[in-house]
């Protein structure tokens, strides 16, 4: 239980149903859908659509989506809604232009967005209410305006330079030449019209016709190789989830091209170390840092689109590898012989979890990767495009080398916990590359140390930043803990911004109740009915 004399927030408890998101308007939209007879998936889609409007720097219909769904039968459905590179684009083409990596504000950073396809496919198979009803709250906010929230303004202000680099993005997101202040009302009428078209026409409202033509024409004008066929043929897929056992629970993740396997690798390593006492003790943080560094080295060596490259999931989740990696960790000093990492930083995403009255659970994540994605906005449709293609590498022969119609390594990962064959916690952690570590960190604090959801979410975070050899840490850590980690050889630096965000809902089957937590690093909340 938290200390009520210190700043913080309580966990939210309820009986019938619950939703947790990173924006109050999205959580409220989900609750209204649940109250109107919708199920967990309906509520998650409605909430996500709202966030595509009110958190434009974190997510959008120009991005990708992954989901895990679970019901009382214990069956976990996984959906990979990540987009593919254009059929005409190759790594050799970009190397021929003298590029060693894909620039952010470039048409080549834009893979065909997968979010709308994922929403419509999942709704057709698992939804309950009419699809148009789910998009109505988002359409209203985009057309009539929404008040800019505090964290949304913080992220918006940091990306003003990027948005100024594209005339379309500047027109919509820098009205009057600046980001809107907290409390100002912002509108996106073109996006409202596009959402209305999707509400009427479903998937074809985005991947065929005027919206697809607008995006393709805009990217082609910038030198992109996208075609209408690339959009018409875009399709996500149901995939077999992967899992690992941790402290008498089954942890489910989506398989590659997502990095859920890396979260499970970290948990496998942590399972080989005792956990008791202070969850922020230097010894425990030392183990978490090293487990993350070792697992992420494997990520950058092996992770790719399994349809076009061999990804040794069995090996990565094997006891033999976990034993080997855990055996390398020394508590007296940091490892000096870490494998080289590909560069990467924290990125923005939204994560949503919902549990309905029938105990259907939705773990739902949607992203445009960097804050405001590529910073490229299609002019007539108002679609802000992601930069997920930057996750490809241009190195010849690498498993994650850019190739036609290939999906890049993906950072966004929804999570689901089962116990004795029944779901007990949908959960997720935002923050791009941090997410795999964030999953392991959150679950360890709850399952190893017995912390409540909100307590675990509130704890200070650190992250060994890939490619730099440094460890970023939030400034809420005790100074003596940071000093001890530095003494052991870790290069600890201030993070400069909050690390990630999280939402989770725990099912208390003994009492028939729900407990939810939502990250104070964001604007959102958990609400129950």
Image (cartoon, grey):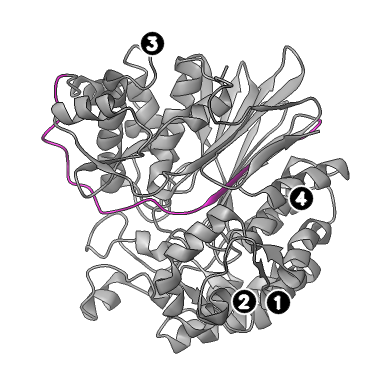
- Residue reaching furthest to the bottom: 221
Q: Which residue position holds label 2?
A: 382
Does residue 23 sit above or below 359 in this rendering? below
x and y percentages locating residue 29 in the rendered image: 76, 50
Q: How far apart are marks 4 and 3 (CA)?
A: 40 Å
Which residue is nearer to you in this view: 341 or 146?
A: 146
273 displayed left or right of 370: left
Label whose residue precedes the other's in the sequence (2 or 1): 1
Q: Do the residues labelled 2 and 1 touch (CB within 8 Å)?
A: yes
- Horizontal and vertical percent for residue 521? 51, 43
Res 15 → quadrant: top right
Q: Which of the pair 181/497 is nearer the observer?
A: 181
Q: In this view, does 163 lie above or below 512?
A: below
Cα–Cα gap, marks 2 and 1 = 8 Å
Q: Report, in whole angstroms, how far the alpha carbon at label 3 lies from the one at label 1.
A: 53 Å
* Screen quadrant of the N terminus: top right
Q: Distance from label 3 to label 2 (Cα)? A: 51 Å
Q: Which of marks 3 and 2 is in front?
A: 3
Residue at the disc numbered 4:
29
Distance CA(mark 4)–CA(mark 2): 22 Å
Residue 338 in picture, x, y percent from top left? 16, 37
Which badge, 4 or 3, is on the more N-terminal residue? 4
**Tag 1 residue:** 189
Dot 2: element? loop
Residue that carries the numbered disc 3 in the rendered image: 277
Under tag 1, what secondary structure? helix
Q: Main secondary structure of the magenta part?
A: loop
């Amino acid at each position: 239980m938290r200390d009520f004399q210190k700043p913080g927030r309580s966990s939210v408890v309820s009986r019938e149903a619950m939703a947790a998101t990173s924006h109050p308007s999205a959580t409220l939209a989900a609750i209204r859908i649940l109250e109107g007879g919708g199920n967990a998936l309906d509520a998650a889609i409605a909430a996500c659509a709202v966030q595509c409007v009110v958190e434009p720097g974190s997510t959008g219909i120009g991005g990708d989506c992954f989901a895990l769904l679970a019901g009382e039968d214990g069956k976990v459905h996984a959906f990979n809604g990540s987009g593919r590179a254009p059929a005409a684009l190759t790594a050799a083409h970009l190397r021929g232009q003298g590029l060693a990596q894909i620039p952010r504000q470039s048409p080549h950073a834009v893979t065909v967005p997968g979010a709308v396809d994922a929403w419509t496919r999942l709704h057709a198979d698992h939804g309950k209410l009419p699809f148009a009803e789910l998009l109505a709250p988002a359409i209203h906010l985009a057309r009539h305006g929404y008040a800019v929230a505090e964290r949304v303004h913080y992220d918006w202000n940091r990306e003003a330079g990027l948005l100024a680099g594209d005339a379309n993005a500047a027109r919509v997101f820098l009205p009057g030449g600046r980001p809107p202040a907290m409390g100002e009302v912002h509108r996106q009428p073109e996006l409202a019209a596009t959402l209305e078209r999707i509400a009427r026409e479903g998937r074809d409202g985005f991947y065929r016709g005027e919206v697809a033509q607008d995006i393709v024409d805009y990217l082609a004008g910038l030198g992109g190789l996208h075609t209408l066929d690339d959009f018409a043929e875009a399709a996500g897929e149901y995939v077999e989830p992967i899992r690992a056992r941790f402290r008498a629970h089954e942890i489910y993740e989506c398989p590659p091209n997502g990095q859920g396997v890396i979260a499970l690798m970290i948990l496998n390593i942590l399972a080989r170390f005792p956990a008791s006492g202070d969850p922020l003790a230097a010894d425990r943080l030392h183990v978490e840092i090293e487990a993350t560094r070792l697992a992420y080295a494997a990520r950058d060596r092996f992770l790719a689109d399994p349809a076009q490259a061999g990804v040794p999931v069995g090996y990565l989740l094997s006891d033999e590898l976990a034993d080997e990696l855990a055996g390398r960790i020394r508590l007296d000093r940091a490892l000096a012989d870490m494998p080289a990492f590909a560069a990467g930083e924290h990125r923005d995403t939204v994560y949503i979890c919902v549990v309905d009255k029938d105990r259907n659970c939705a773990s739902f994540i949607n992203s445009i990767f960097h804050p405001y994605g590529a910073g490229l906005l299609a002019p007539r449709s108002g679609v802000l495009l992601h930069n997920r293609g930057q996750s490809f590498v241009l190195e010849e022969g690498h498993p994650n080398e850019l190739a036609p119609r290939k999906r890049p390594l993906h950072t966004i990962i929804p999570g689901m916990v089962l116990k004795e064959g029944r779901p007990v916690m949908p959960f997720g952690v935002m923050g791009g590359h941090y997410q795999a570590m964030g999953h392991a960190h959150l679950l360890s604090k709850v399952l190893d140390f017995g912390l409540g959801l909100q307590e675990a979410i509130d704890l200070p975070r650190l992250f060994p930043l890939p490619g730099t050899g440094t460890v970023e840490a939030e400034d809420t850590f005790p100074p003596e803990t940071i000093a001890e980690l530095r003494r052991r050889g870790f290069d600890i630096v201030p993070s400069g911004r909050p690390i990630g965000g999280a939402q989770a809902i725990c099912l208390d089957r003994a009492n028939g109740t729900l407990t939810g937590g939502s990250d104070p690093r964001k604007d959102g909340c958990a609400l129950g009915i």
